[in-house]
């Protein structure tokens, strides 16, 4: 059910690096099927927050819950990934010497216990899933081209598709449109709007036009100095004097 419940809940999460508080009692929750944009000035703690969620960084205090009450705090990165949290880093990582189709096939076959191989045959429904994903990514013309030949934006879409093949319950995306052309950014917004409601997504992004395009009337969270400064519709946070101050006061 994508309309009820909480997929992720951070409760009073604190992270300190040598006494410096990168996250300061951060509390945040994301609904199932929600597309939540996270913005905030440099150093606000956005990357640290994603590192805590994915288990790369252990919080000094606070808890991370997945679903209603599944406590992820202190679990390994592998266990958290296995629980269904996928993360897309800023730079694209695709298998450059494989085709678009093969990249998705490898992602689909990535099984925690078996090294993925292209030799095992695909079932008809698996092939169909891959083709549907290629269509969603609008990479049909490139389906049998080597991924290494794709543009930066196309590689980013492919990697999002690869993550989707693994059916994550929550997908974290770090600055998905960084380095994209305007046309690619526009297409990425369309892709995110297509994913909206079907998947639970957390998007950290600096490009405000892009955030405006994908947020709709959904919530945007503004982080500052390791905690939530403001939360609400894009319009509400953009007009919030506290938010204006941290963006313009620097
Ligand atoms: P953002 O992603 O919002 O730009 P970060 O989470 O990267 O913010 O960083 C938050 C603060 O924590 C910054 O001041 C940064 O310098 C500091 N920080 C992040 N990681 C480390 C680390 N490993 N050691 C020391 N300080 C860190």
Image (cartoon, grey):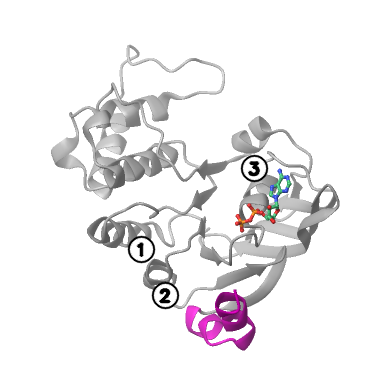
Residue 218 lies, with reference to residue 111, above or below; the image says below
Indicate which disc residue 75 carries: none
The reply to whether discs 1 and 2 touch (Cβ–Cβ < 8 Å) is yes
Q: Secondary structure at mark 2?
A: loop
Which region of the structure is painted magenta?
234-250
Pointer 3 residue: 54
Pointer 1 residue: 193
**Count of numbered circles on the image:** 3
* Residue in the foreground of this view, choosing between 83 and 214: 214
First of labels 3, 2 by sequence position: 3
Residue 234 lies, with reference to residue 13, above or below; the image says below
In front: mark 1 or mark 3?
Answer: 3
Q: Is residue 90 visible?
A: yes
Residue 85 location in percent, x, y?
58, 43
Pointer 2 residue: 216
Q: Which residue sits at x=65%, y=62%?
A: 44
């Amino acid at each position: 059910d994508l309309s009820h419940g909480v997929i992720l809940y951070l409760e009073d999460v604190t992270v300190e690096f040598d006494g410096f508080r990168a996250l300061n009692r951060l509390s945040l929750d994301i609904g199932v099927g929600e597309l939540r944009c996270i913005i905030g000035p440099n150093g606000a703690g956005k990357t640290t927050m994603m590192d805590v969620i994915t288990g790369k960084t252990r919080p000094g205090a606070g808890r991370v819950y997945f679903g209603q009450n599944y406590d992820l705090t202190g679990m390994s990165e592998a266990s958290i990934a296995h629980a269904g949290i996928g993360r897309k880093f800023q730079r694209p990582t695709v298998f450059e010497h494989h085709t678009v189709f093969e990249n998705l096939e490898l992602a689909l076959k990535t099984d925690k216990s078996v090294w993925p191989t292209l030799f095992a045959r695909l079932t008809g429904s698996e092939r169909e899933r891959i083709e549907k994903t290629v269509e969603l990514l609008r990479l049909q013309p490139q389906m049998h081209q080597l991924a290494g030949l794709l543009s930066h934006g196309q590689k980013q879409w492919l990697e999002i598709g690869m993550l989707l093949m693994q059916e994550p319950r929550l997908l974290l995306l770090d600055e998905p449109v960084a380095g994209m052309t305007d046309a690619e950014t526009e297409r990425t917004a369309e892709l995110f709007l297509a994913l909206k409601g079907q998947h639970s997504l957390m998007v950290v992004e600096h490009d405000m036009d892009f955030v405006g395009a994908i947020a709709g009337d959904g919530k945007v969270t503004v982080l500052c100095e390791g905690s939530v400064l403001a939360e609400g519709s894009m319009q509400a946070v953009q007009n919030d004097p506290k938010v204006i101050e941290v963006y313009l006061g620097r």
